[in-house]
Structures are given as C-alpha cells and as structure tokens.
Amino acid sequence: MKTKLVTCEDINKKTFKVKAEELSFRPSIYGLLFKGDKILLSRQWDGYDFPGGGVKKGEPMLDALKREFWEETGLQVTPAKLITVTENFFISVESHKSLHGILIYYLCKSPKGEISTKYFDTNEKTYMSAAQWIAVKDIKKIKFYNGVDSVKLIKQAYAIFKNKQLK
C-alpha cells in the first residue's frame, strides 16, 4: 500500500512533504473584531494574524476563543457569528510538528478592556507585540502569518458586521 503524503507549509511558506499518519490534529479558533472601518489584528513578527489559537483538550470552542482573544489582545469579547471553518496543513513554529489544522473563525462583538500584552505566554512574548487596529481598506497591503486568504475572510466578515451592525 502506498503511503499518502501531504504538503505542509512552514511560517515562511516553504513546503514539505509529510506522511499523513505523522500529522496531528490541531483545532484552533480565531476572532474578527471590527470598530468602525478597522479590524483588530495580532501583531506577529513583521506581519499580522487574527487573535486566537489552539483549543485545549476538553475546552469548549467558544471558551477557547474568549481565552485566546483575551491572552493576545487584553480584550474580553463575545462571539457573535460563525464566519467560516477551514483547514490547513502546517509545521508548528513552536513544536516543529506537522499539523492538520482545523481553523474556525468567528465575528466577535462587545469588547471590554484595553489592548495589552500582559497576558502573552512565554513563547508569544518572543514574536508578538500589541494588537493593532488596521483600516479595512489597507488589508491588501499587509503581510499575514496564517494559512487562509485573510483578505477574503476580512471582507466577508466586514460585510456581515456592516449589515448587522454588531457592536
């Protein structure tokens, strides 16, 4: 029987062929929060990502979203609407393991608190800085560190935000 190979990407978009049986599942959840015509993004290295991250075993997904969003931004949010669920295959920056990521994206609302780096974990302190509000009109100009079409995702969520006026 032929071994199935999967193409994984590292953080620099370099590809690697990995045996499918060597992959680990990693569910993760991310929040999109808008204020007027701006979106809050996590600053990572010389680019950005959406606030969020891995769901811990036994942790309800929406609890994970609230926890991760708070850890990466200092803000407490309320999940408002599921935007999309997708997947990717990647090499973890932290563990260097090959992962099959299940990526869940929610539109969030009702932020409370102030943007802070106070709740970063030890690893996040090495590559992240304070979250920033970025004009939606400028999203095509910035670099994203994730495995999704960030511009398309932001446009989709922003249209829902504008139509529903989730505040």
Image (spheres, helix red, strand yellow):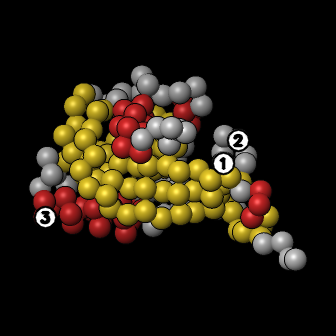
Residue 76 visible in rendering = yes
| Residue 142 image-quadrant placement | bottom left
Name which residue type carries label 1: Ser
- The 10 Å Cα crowd at callout 2, few under 14, some 14 to 19, many 20 or more, is few
Name which residue type carries label 3: Asn
Q: CA separation, marks 1 and 2?
A: 5 Å
Choose between 19 and 133: the one closer to the eye. Answer: 19
Q: Is residue 11 left or right of residue 104?
A: right
Q: Which residue is mark 3?
A: 163
Q: Position of residue 100 (x, y in %)?
A: 63, 58
Q: CA separation, marks 3 and 1?
A: 36 Å
Name which residue type carries label 2: Ser
Please tell me how many numbered marks the rendered image carries.
3
Evaluate if marks 1 and 2 touch, with contact meaning CB atoms under 8 Å apart.
yes
Q: Which residue is mark 2?
A: 95
Q: Position of residue 9 (x, y in %)?
A: 66, 61
Choose between 46 and 113: the one closer to the eye. Answer: 113
Q: Position of residue 124 (x, y in %)?
A: 54, 33
Q: Residue at x 46, y 37 (%)?
A: 59
Q: Residue at x 44, y 25 (%)?
A: 119
Secondary structure category for the residue under label 2: loop
Residue 42 visible in rendering = no
Choose between 26 and 73: the one closer to the eye. Answer: 26
Q: Which residue is mark 1?
A: 92
